[in-house]
Image: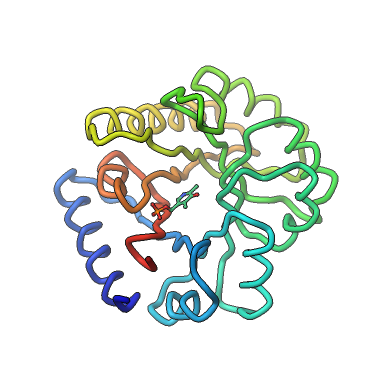
């Protein structure tokens, strides 16, 4: 298994090159997706200097949190079942998968302080994907005005399952466009400055299109 630090060096160089290529200058944070690896490998991620960790199951999150007491920012990146909100909501720093009002309601009820949320959008409209379709995103965000425990920090999407880079790029571009529309609304509870997009196979394209958080698992820890 390649050392995390060596993978990171390669990924960081790819990120720098992507930014240069596209002439973009946004800060890009790597969320190390550790859902498939054990605590030892996760500690290696922290030792390599990364602090943002992504998990997609309450069990995996808790296992890691029990053994990593400090130094990590916890990102919940998967579909979150409403009945599991109470198990995790006060232990995470970011939720990447807010996609329905019933979930917002449960967060409102259970969270002890505002939670930084990304609204998950299904820009490509693939049926297998979670998230709001393009046209639903802004109406949904407007509905969140009365939810004091929800801070909309950004939008999140997953690219469609395709080799076609133009299709992937278009999805990321659309998400950026949508994000700018939300920013223009100037809602105090929805600054929406962040874009969570790009995984192991497409993070370079995502960065070229404006990603500020890339969620990388396999290429970093796999
Ligand atoms: C697993 C996962 C990732 C990381 O995927 P890789 O292809 O391993 O980089 C990113 N985002 C979400 C939502 C995931 O579930």
Q: Residue at x 56, y 46 (%)?
A: 96
Task: Indicate the quadrant containing the N terminus: top left, top right, bottom left or bottom right.
Answer: bottom left
Q: Residue at x 72, y 43 (%)?
A: 81
Q: Residue at x 56, y 59 (%)?
A: 55
Q: Position of residue 90 (x, y in %)?
A: 75, 59
Q: Where 150 falls versus 7 (above or below)?
A: above
Query: Which residue is situated farthest in the right direction here?
Result: 109
Specify the quadrant of the image occupied by residue 48: bottom left
Left or right: residue 79 versus residue 31 is: right
Q: Nearer the viewer, residue 22 or 218?
A: 218
Q: Position of residue 34 (x, y in %)?
A: 49, 65
Specify the quadrant of the image occupied by residue 188: top right
Specify the quadrant of the image occupied by residue 222: bottom left
Q: Residue at x 50, y 24 (%)?
A: 127
Left or right: residue 164 versus residue 60 is: left
Q: Where 94 falls versus 105 (above or below)?
A: below
Q: Nearer the viewer, residue 216 or 29?
A: 216
Q: Nearer the viewer, residue 133 or 37?
A: 37
How many labels were placed on the picture?
A: 0
Q: Position of residue 23 (x, y in %)?
A: 18, 45
Q: Position of residue 11 (x, y in %)?
A: 26, 63
Left or right: residue 180 versus residue 24 is: right
């Amino acid at each position: 298994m390649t050392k995390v630090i060596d993978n990171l060096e390669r990924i960081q160089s790819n990120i720098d090159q992507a930014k240069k290529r596209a002439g973009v200058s946004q800060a890009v944070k790597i969320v190390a997706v550790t859902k498939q690896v054990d605590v030892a490998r996760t500690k290696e991620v922290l030792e390599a200097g990364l602090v943002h960790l992504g998990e997609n199951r309450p069990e995996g999150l808790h296992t890691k949190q029990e053994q990593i007491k400090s130094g990590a920012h916890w990102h919940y990146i998967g579909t979150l079942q409403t009945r599991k909100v109470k198990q995790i909501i006060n232990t995470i720093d970011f939720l990447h998968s807010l996609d329905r009002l019933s979930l917002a309601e449960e967060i409102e009820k259970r969270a002890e302080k505002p939670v930084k949320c990304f609204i998950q959008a299904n820009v490509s409209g693939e049926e297998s994907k979670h998230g709001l379709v393009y046209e639903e995103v802004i109406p949904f965000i407007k509905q969140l005005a009365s939810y004091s425990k929800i801070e909309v920090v950004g939008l999140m999407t997953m690219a469609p399952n395709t080799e076609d880079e133009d299709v992937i790029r278009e999805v990321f571009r659309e998400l950026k466009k949508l994000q700018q529309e939300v920013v223009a609304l100037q809602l105090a509870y929805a600054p929406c400055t962040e874009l969570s997009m790009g995984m192991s196979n497409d993070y370079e394209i995502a960065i070229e299109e404006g990603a500020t958080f890339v969620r990388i698992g396999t290429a970093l820890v796999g």
